[in-house]
Structures are given as C-alpha cells and as structure tokens.
Image (cartoon, helix red, strand yellow):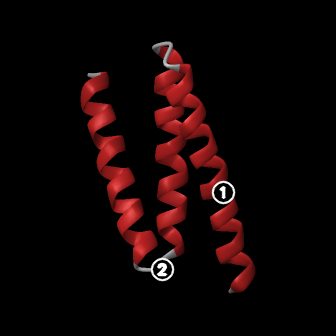
Amino acid sequence: MIDYLMWLVTAGAIVGAYLNVKKRPSGFALWTLTNAANAARCISVGQYAIAGGFAVFFGLAVWGLIEWRSKS
C-alpha cells in the first residue's frame, strides 16, 4: 500500500514542478507537501541523507511560496 502512496507522491511532485515552470504558486504548495512526504518516508526507512535533501527542498518550497505570496 505504501508503494502506491509513494507513487502518488511522486506524481504530485512532478505536477508541482510543472506548475512551478508555469509560474503558478500552487506548484510551490504541492511541491512543499510532496517534499515533506518524501522526507518522512526516507526517515522511516533510515535513508537520512536523502531525507536531508528532501528537508532542504521542503524549506526551499516554503520559501518560494512565501516569495510568491509577497509579490501578489
């Protein structure tokens, strides 16, 4: 079951990246959620280096979302 969930998270990350390319703030919101999910999953299986990367991406996504909101 978790594999299917992670496939959905992966699909969400791809859609989020696409929306970012199209300069849609919703892309950052989706990307933020998928990065958090990926970080949590990596922590749960002991892949701490990868989890660290996703944690950084999470922070960047939050920052991007804040930047988008401050410009509108």
Which disc, if any, is residue 62?
A: 1
Measured from the top left, where is residue 48 in percent x and y?
56, 21
Q: Which SS class for mark 1?
A: helix
Label 1 with label 2: CB-CB less than 8 Å: no
- Gap in angstroms between the C-alphas marked 1 and 2: 15 Å
| Tally of marks | 2
Residue 61, placed above or below residue 58: below
Q: Residue at x 63, y 43 (%)?
A: 56
Residue 58, placed above or below residue 62: above
Q: Residue at x 54, y 60 (%)?
A: 29
5 or 18, which is in the foreground? 18
What is the three-letter code of the residue carrying label 2?
Answer: Lys
Residue topped by disc 2 = 23
Measured from the top left, where is residue 13 in percent x and y?
39, 52
Marked residue nearer the N-terminal end (1 or 2): 2
Q: Residue at x 50, y 29 (%)?
A: 50
Which disc, if any, is residue 27?
A: none
Quadrant holding the C terminus: bottom right
Measured from the top left, where is residue 47 in percent x and y?
49, 19
Instruction: Categorize mark 1 by other alpha carbons within 10 Å: few (<14), some (14-19), many (20+).
Output: some
Q: Which SS class for mark 2?
A: loop
What is the three-letter code of the residue carrying label 1?
Answer: Val
Residue 43, placed above or below residue 39: above
